[in-house]
Amino acid sequence: MGAEHRGKGVNVALGPMTNMGRVAAGGRNWEGFGADPYLSGVSTAQTVLGMQSTGVIACVKHYIGNEQEHFRGGSEASQVYSSNIDDKTMHELYSWPFAEAVKAGVGSVMCSYNYVNQTQTCQNSKLLNGILKEELDFQGFVLSDWAAMINGVQTALAGADMNMPGFFAYGNPVEPNPDNTTSSWWGSALIESVKNGSVPEARVDDMVTRSMAAFYKLGQDSASYPKVNFDYNTEDTFLNGVKVNEHVNVQADHYKLIREIGAASSVLLKNTKNALPLSVNKIKRIAIVGSDAGPNPDGPNGCGDRGCDQGTLAMGWGSGTANFPYLIDPLSAISNFVHNADPTTVIEGVLSDFNYPQIQSVASHADTCLAFVNADSGEGYITVDGNAGDRKNLTLWHGGEALINTTAGACANTIVVMHAVGPVLVESWIEHPNVTAVIQAGLPGQESGNALVDVLFGGVSPSGRLPYTIAKQLGDYPADVLYTSSDKAPQITYSEGLDIDYRHFDANNITPRFEFGFGLSYTTFVYNGLNIHPGTISKARAARHPRSLLCGSRIWLCVWRARAQQRHELRSVRICICIRRDVRLARRKCHLRADQRERAQRLLHHHVHRHERHARAHLCACLRLILRLRLQQRDHHRIRVRTPLQRYHRAPVQRDRHHLPRPPRSPRPPVISSPVQTSPGGPAQLFDTVWTVTYAVTNTGKVAGHEVSQLYLGFPDAGKSEPVRVLRGFARTFLKPGQTEILHLKLRRKDVADWDCGGNRDVVKQKWVVPSGAFKVEVGSSSRQIHLTGTFVAPSAA
């Protein structure tokens, strides 16, 4: 994506979208990554890194609480909802992906149309100045969604940096007008606000600095960066005699990656009677039914912004879409593949969704039937089949349920292929004995048909996993779209708190049809050997190391333990000496003479007897004394190599120097407060690795395939103030039959912390805290298929 945007001369790509999918029918859920903050955070960060590696500024959106299209707001909206979100839920759920994007260095953030806690997001100082720019230390610029600003001075003071596209509302010209009036909240109006003292000049300087910082950071000032070479308003080459489109083709060989992603992301939901993969040598007659199997009769781009559901569904609708350069439909791709292998195979297609007699006739004579169905959604400015952005229900479109049951009633081997923007209800047909396999193919893009062929005929073993839960009924979900309201300002209270999607199902013991993270494969996998280690485990820990050190060598130092006896008198200090970050040499116990004790006592004072975390800063001040007293060159031959469990700061041994090496961070997670001295994404300590989980996965099947293992954590207060389980890691690994791989998943301090907003403990805390007690570790192939379990204990939080 980054390369294609750069090729067109784009400065800012308006993505990725990282909303959480709070409601299953949300119109723009398909643009995001799923209904979990960790999953969305990792995906968002990787997208930002990839796009910005090409020099294009990424813009993460929509900040924040923009979870449905009804009453979302806009320049001409009469009703705009307020998402009312508590502080804990805001930090642990909705702002999590944005924090990961900031950590990845995202250049811009888009504030949304809606209100949050009664204040419009683009003029919400708590969100923009407080959380985004202070807590998360965001260094880029905040731009408004198109015509989302509703005020000039307040948006400037609240932290917005760029007004897009520059006018009050759609239909108004861009400022300035010939009559010297303004149709923009900013522009000349902002100049007047500075002159009259409403907006400090320093605030405008900050806007410019932030905007240009991203421009220069990503090298867009370079002569090699392409100029804008297109006009998105028209495909004509010339407009008013001026060349506006150079029609630069930026596709390169990206179709290969698009096809690969389309196949890999397909989720196999059901596979009985060895229905899949198909074998062209065994099938002599195939029936393909449903309009979703074929092309759009008006062409792949026949509907503006993809605002229709005709033919195969490969993209939702709205402003986040793009024109297809081509679109390969499933019927064409399957026909080409099968006929290339065996020209005698009969393929019959019925592309009418409601011609049940013909569907039944064709299906009754086929060895295998493929029933294609879909469900679409998009942005609220377009209504398709009565769906104003958000889906009006979770059923299949075009009578998909009847099409499946009609086909299955006549064909003993019916395979269902769904192209859907999100969860759909499948209870009316999923257990039909003739429905032998189900694939959720999602929205695969221009290589749709080819990607599906790869999965159907075994070229690729499906490895897609559901990024949401498929329920048995609509009422099983924790919340639904607010479709109607008589209020001028509709209120949407996020009463479910942290328990969205699978978290809600777990908390309320609801059995879903298909759980979050679910997905089958053409092969089988076995898990074993779970181990949980504090800190980071290095692959070089078992390597051989020298038995002695030369005086003056660069080493790492760590106070291991200090022991005080009567009246806090320092008797001895144990220290660790390391020649590498991952190799701890033997602990050395250093006894001190009486005169040395007095000097050390002044340095250490009474903190020695306290918890190691408090004592460390004072203990390190004694290192120079200890080194000079006890670490003589004659002692080096006595130092033996040990295996490590801690990381150490590197520092040279320097005699008679007054500056000392910084103490290492503890492998056990201390309390982290916020706001504190921050780095992009939040306090730097939040991103330290504090635990490493290792386990082995073996392919026990007969074909090669990818397994997507998932790590879930249960906090000490799981099921109370925290969800029953939360996703905190995943890994996709390719294994040949019989092959085993040991996987390492790292848990950062943030992953094991919760946002303490007070509650019964302290109403003014508002900081990240690692709760004391036992954490439950679960590793499996979905949120409910757990294969390995373990625990680790976090120390008491001070």
Image (cartoon, rainbow, N blue to C red):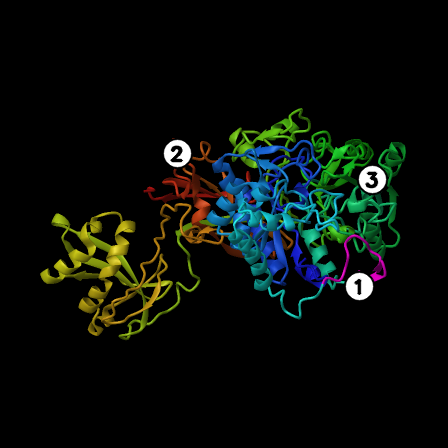
- The quarter holding residue 286 reads top right
Q: Which residue is mark 1?
A: 246
Which residue shows up at 38% across the image and 63% down it?
582
The answer to whether residue 143 is seen in the rendering is no
How many angstroms separate mark 2 from mark 3 (CA)? 57 Å
- The quarter holding residue 512 reads top right
Q: Which residue is mark 3?
A: 290
Q: Is residue 517 above or below residue 667?
A: above
Q: Main secondary structure of the magenta part?
A: loop
In the image, what residue type sits under mark 1? Answer: Glu
- Going from N to C along the chain, the mark reached first, 3 or 1, is 1
Q: Is residue 188 left or right of residue 591?
A: right
Frontmost of labels 3 and 1 is: 1
Magenta segment range?
A: 228-248
Asked whether the residues under the numbered discs 3 and 1 touch, taking CB atoms below 8 Å apart as contact, a structural biologist would say no
- The quarter holding residue 639 reads bottom left
In the image, what residue type sits under mark 3? Answer: Gly
**Mark 3 Cα within 10 Å, few/some/many (few <14, many 20+)?**
many
* The C terminus - image quarter: top left
* The N terminus - image quarter: bottom right
**231 drawn magenta:** yes
**Mark 1 Cα within 10 Å, few/some/many (few <14, many 20+)?**
some
Asked whether the residues under the numbered discs 2 and 3 touch, taking CB atoms below 8 Å apart as contact, a structural biologist would say no
Frontmost of labels 2 and 3 is: 2
Marking on residue 763: 2
Q: Is residue 735 above or below residue 524?
A: below
In the image, what residue type sits under mark 2? Answer: Val
